[in-house]
Amino acid sequence: MNGSTGGYDDRSTRQRLAAATQYSSDEIDLESVVVRYENRTDRCTIVPRECPEADRLTTWLSADVRVFVDLDDMR
């Protein structure tokens, strides 16, 4: 047991928050990877480009490709 009531390890949460604060700029260069499937919706995963390999396991966003929109189209 780690003492967290939410089921998350409080130490790793603090480490991720500390790592996130290292980005002093409001702009973060992102990288996307699309995985294409034959029998289901393709998935897109987005991670910070300069993210250390160990942090990539917990610093990402993944969703179905169809939910992403072009930013210029939304402006």
Image (cartoon, rainbow, N blue to C red):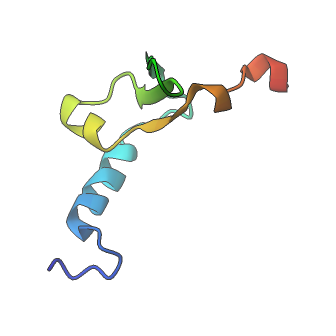
* Residue in view at x 23 percent, y 59 percent: 12
* Residue in view at x 44 percent, y 29 percent: 45
Q: Where on the picture, by quarter, is residue 53?
A: top left
Give the side of residue 43 with respect to residue 51, left or right. right
Q: Nearer the viewer, residue 61 or 26?
A: 61
Q: Where on the picture, by quarter, is residue 14?
A: bottom left
Label count reads 0
In the image, is residue 20 above or below residue 1?
above
In the image, is residue 46 above or below residue 36?
below
* Residue in view at x 46 percent, y 28 percent: 46
Residue 69 placement (x, y as % from top left): 71, 25
Residue 4 placement (x, y as % from top left): 27, 79
Give the side of residue 46 with respect to residue 50, left or right. right
Residue 74 placement (x, y as % from top left): 82, 26
Q: Where on the picture, by quarter, is residue 52?
A: top left
Q: Which quadrant of the rendered structure holds the N terminus?
A: bottom left
Q: Nearer the viewer, residue 37 or 30?
A: 37
* Residue in view at x 58 percent, y 25 percent: 65
Q: Nearer the viewer, residue 7 or 10?
A: 7
Residue farthest front in this picture: 39
Q: Which quadrant of the rendered structure holds the C terminus?
A: top right
Residue farthest left in this picture: 1
